Image: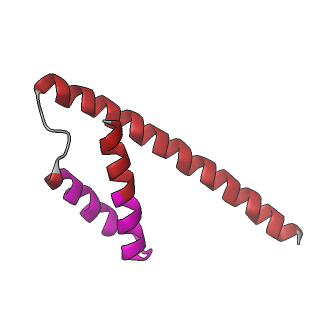
Amino acid sequence: MERIEVLRREIDGIDKGILELLEERVKAAKKIGEIKREKGMEIEDVDREGEILDNILNSTNLNREFVGDLFRKIIEYCKNEE
């Protein structure tokens, strides 16, 4: 059972790291949103979103449907924050 607890603490640390990175991503998206507003640009950039998804899906061994769904949600959240 001790080994399970060690692994659970490892997962807790990984989860914390994921959240920290997500928060950094949102901060960067907000900065991009400010620049886009200053320049009169649209928030949504379908080409860039496709590029992000392609890069992500080509960089993982995880289930592509799962990863695609996850990143679509992340992108949508970030667009709303922009």
Question: Looking at the picture, how far across and down is residue 23, in whole percent?
Answer: 48, 40
Identified at 37% across, 66% down, the residue is 69
* Magenta residue check for 51: yes
Identify the image quadrant of residue 39: top left
Task: Please indicate whether residue 24 sits to the left or right of residue 3 in the image.
Answer: left
Is 23 drawn above or below residue 57 in the view shown?
A: above
- Give the extent of the magenta segment: 48-72
Identified at 33% across, 41% down, the residue is 80
Quadrant showing the C terminus: top left
Identified at 33% across, 32% down, the residue is 30
- Give the colouring mode of the picture: secondary structure
Specify the farthest residue to the top.
38
Question: Looking at the picture, how far across and down is residue 60, in whole percent?
Answer: 40, 69
Question: Looking at the picture, how far across and down is residue 18, in whole percent?
Answer: 54, 51
Identify the image quadrant of residue 3: bottom right
Question: Is residue 20 visible in the rendered structure shown here?
Answer: yes
